[in-house]
Amino acid sequence: MAYKRVLLKLSGEALAGDKRTGFDEATCVAVGKQVKQLIDDGIQVAVVIGGGNFWRGRSSETIDRIKADHIGCLATVMNCIYVSEIFRFCGMDTAVYTPFACGSFTELFTKDKAVKDLKAGKVVFLAGGTGHPLFSTDTATSLRAIELDTDVILMARAVDGVYDSDPKENPNAKRFDTISFEEVLERKLKILDMTATVMCMEHKVPLFIFSLNEENGIVKAAKGEPIGTTVTP
């Protein structure tokens, strides 16, 4: 059964394709075409994009952490503006929201305005993280999913779900079809940061993790097909 309103989390690195930095336009267009199918089917879509294709400030030993996180917030704004335009090219209406003023580039986020746009069939991009340092885009994803009453968070990654160990290091790693947030915390599985994990658990927001490389994976995930791991509250 398809969901009615989803929050799609995309990694910045995934949008860079094999280039690993910046944007791979073909990858972004392929994502846009899938999201267009969801919109055409009446599914409301909000999007959060990480900034790792431009900036990973936490690994820097020379820049103050707070300032590094400010740069990361702006990287997500660039990503959302770019992908928003790709989605428009694919035939969708979009709106880009930030929790801080960006001149005329974006709109200031409010729940009421964002929900109104979702109901009107626009893809709503949620850029700029939470607007504060020390919070990841995972936390921003959880926060916005709760605020916008989404049915599920769809998390597109390079790995096709949650494993009991790193599948890159352990060829016998087991993928979970379903796992609870509580078990994720107990096993110390790093699928989200701890703040985001606890928020999803407390507010009962399910998470579905799947591979962006799966053919038509976004469409399959939004329609509830078992191509990854469901993390339950």
Image (cartoon, helix red, strand yellow):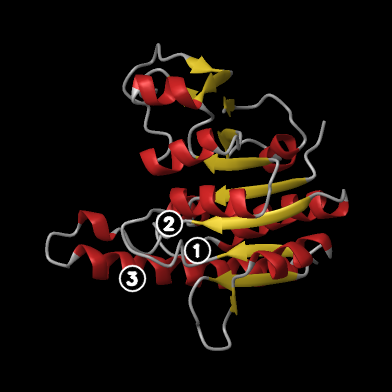
Q: Are marks 2 and 1 in contact (CB under 8 Å)?
A: yes
Q: Which mark is residue 23?
A: 1
x, y percentage for residue 5? 75, 48
Task: Specify the farthest residue to the right.
Answer: 41
Q: Give SS at disc 1.
A: loop
| Residue hosting label 3 | 71
Q: Which mark is residue 96?
A: none
Return the x and y of residue 147 as percentages of the image width and height. 61, 54
| Image quarter of the C terminus | top right
Q: Tell me the mark number nearer the camera, choosing from 2 and 1.
A: 1
Vertical placement of residue 131 versus 40, above or below: below
| Pointer 3 or 2: first along the chain | 2
Circle 2 — which element?
helix
Question: Residue 107 sits in which quadrant?
Answer: bottom right
- Check disc 1 and give the amino acid type: Phe
In the rendered view, tell whether residue 98 sits above or below residue 166: below
Kindly indicate whether the residue at mark 1 contacts the one at mark 3 (C-beta within 8 angstroms): no
Left or right: 219 with respect to 133?
right
Query: Nearest the camera: 103 or 163?
Result: 103
Mark 2 vs mark 1, CA separation in Å: 8 Å
Q: Circle 2 sits on which residue?
A: 19
Mark closest to the chain's N terminus, 3 or 1: 1
Q: CA distance from mark 3 to mark 1?
A: 18 Å
Question: Residue 182 or 32: which is nearer the viewer?
Answer: 182
Tell me the crowding category of disc 3: few under 14, some 14 to 19, or many 20 or more residues within 10 angstroms, Cα based. Answer: some
Provide the secondary structure element on which disc 3 rests.
helix
Q: Which residue sits at x=81%, y=36%? A: 2
Amino acid under label 3?
A: Ile
- Label 2: few (<14), some or many (≥20) within 10 Å? few
